[in-house]
Amino acid sequence: MVRNFTMTIGGSAATARSSFVVEDPATGEVLAEAPECSREQLDEAMRTAADAFTSWSHDARQRRRGLESLAAVVEANIEELADLITSEQGKPIAEARGELRGVLNNLRYFATLELPEELLRDDQRVTVKVLRRPVGPVAAITPWNFPLGTAVAKIAPALAAGCTIVLKPSPFTPLTCLRFGELTRDVLPGGVVNVLSGGNELGAAMVEHPVPRMVSFTGSVATGKRIAAAAAPDLKRLTLELGGNDPAIVLDDADVETVADGIFANAFSNCGQVCVAIKRVYAPERIYDEVVSALAERARAAKVGDGHLDGTEIGPLCNRMQFERVSGLVADALSGGGAAVTGGAAVDGPGYFYEPTVITGVSDGTRIVDEEQFGPALPVLSYRDVDEALARANATHFGLGASIWTSDPDRAAAVAPEVEAGTVWVNSHQSEVPGQPFGGLKWSGIGVEGGRWGLIGFSEIQTVYVARD
Ligand code: NAD
């Protein structure tokens, strides 16, 4: 029997008159029905978020306790939530658990933070304080690649800053967030976290709604631009975490077998559906063939299958749209003279499985090099000298992440600031320590998430000037 999920509005369960189907990407079969939020329910969620804001924004102790309680609930239900992530998104269950560990870290980390306050001047004549105020109720809109991870990356800092939130996950993967709402609705005062579900029109209605003072969005560049335009008439504050086309530059001193492990893992985890995945590799001519064959060997060996099964390393693409996009980009590369050293086709049978693919014979200007493929297909390009590699890595509107792979980390660290990306790693990619900010340059975003910078993003400066003479 198909299970039904409820939205959380004002701390209570909300069903809807209509619903939409959520698929299991490993089978293509119906997994569940999610409520289609009505316009009246959106208004109600926004009203409760605005009502709850007054007391929530004034009680730092309650906020700290609230975030710790959310973490406790997630931890107590981690297996159920991991199973839901794998069921609706497709990733291997071990990666789903990893996503939830990130959720717990975020909730607990932001429980320890408070908005900063600075005393600029304090003498007999004047006291000047620079405060940070929570921005107000927030509309949060998230994608399908990390269903709960991207949502809690907004919920945790927003709540810590004193904001309330209305969340809409992707219509492809709404279930984990809806379940999070069901499990946690008694833990926080009603209206502090509202979880809705619906399609793109619901997201657009949230952005245009008069209540939220800020939109926090994670998703594609195209939608990010639409949201920025739609938020402008009301001057809503914005955080945009958008797409990337991260280059990995292999230096000529690299140990190929070692760097191939790191590059493969960071290009193919979550079936390549990571904003900050490696999406193009630049290898020096001298070791180009070795790099290609080391990556192809790992792609051939990777076990593709249902994320629930033991030993699966790469699950299906999350949905038909993405499956068709990746298939189309690979076909375009192959028809333009590229070669699939391994992979290059869908896996026979049900579900959105695609063979891990390594592509050669393409150049900058080919769609799979220039665009964000967001899937298990990786182009490898050759270069002559490092300046050329840097110029080609930077010749893009994207600027999310990048990495440099070498046996000499200091040499790479010296070059790292030349790469136009929000994060540049050396001999790593996607890694983070607690408190690390994350955001994109150029079209990859506006603002950051993570660390104290992420907290500040949910606030505005207020100066209090007290004249004493
Ligand atoms: P998407 O932009 O299609 O959709 C994201 C969300 O926006 C969904 O909830 C969708 O319903 C909603 N939406 C769509 N149109 C809208 C509109 N006009 N107004 C308001 N909301 C609207 O993105 P996607 O395909 O779900 O996600 C994949 C993209 O997300 C990739 O480009 C990926 O790189 C990016 N991403 C970025 C980060 C980051 O932190 N930078 C993290 C994860 C994913």
Image (spheres, helix red, strand yellow):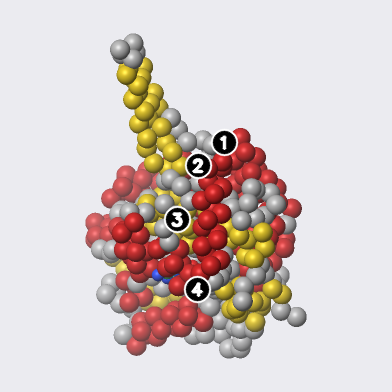
Q: Secondary structure at mark 2?
A: helix
Residue 315 lies, in percent from the top left, at 59, 73
How many angstroms separate mark 3 from mark 1 (CA)?
23 Å
Numbered badge on residue 249: none
Q: Earlier in the sequence, mark 3 or mark 4?
A: 4
In front: mark 3 or mark 2? 3
Q: Secondary structure at mark 1?
A: helix
How many angstroms separate mark 4 from mark 1 (CA)?
34 Å
Reading the image, the residue beneath label 1 is 60
Q: Secondary structure at mark 4?
A: loop
Say if mark 4 contacts mark 1, CB within 8 Å. Answer: no
Task: From the viewer's perspective, tell me whether residue 423 is left or right of residue 99.
Answer: left
Q: Amino acid at mark 4?
A: Gly
Q: Amino acid at mark 2?
A: Ala
Task: From the viewer's perspective, tell me whether residue 466 is left or right of residue 50.
Answer: left
Q: Earlier in the sequence, mark 3 or mark 1?
A: 1
Q: Residue at x 36, y 84 (%)?
A: 332
How many angstroms separate mark 3 from mark 4 (CA)?
20 Å
Q: Earlier in the sequence, mark 4 or mark 1?
A: 1
Q: Secondary structure at mark 3?
A: loop
Q: Residue at x 33, y 49 (%)?
A: 416
Ligand 1 found in image quarter: bottom left
Reading the image, the residue beneath label 4 is 199
Q: Amino acid at mark 3?
A: Val
Which quadrant of the structure image shows residue 364? bottom left
Q: Quadrant of the N terminus?
A: bottom right
Numbered badge on residue 211: 3
Q: Residues within 10 Å of mark 4 (few under 14, many from 20)?
A: some
In front: mark 3 or mark 4? 3
Q: Amino acid at mark 1?
A: Ala
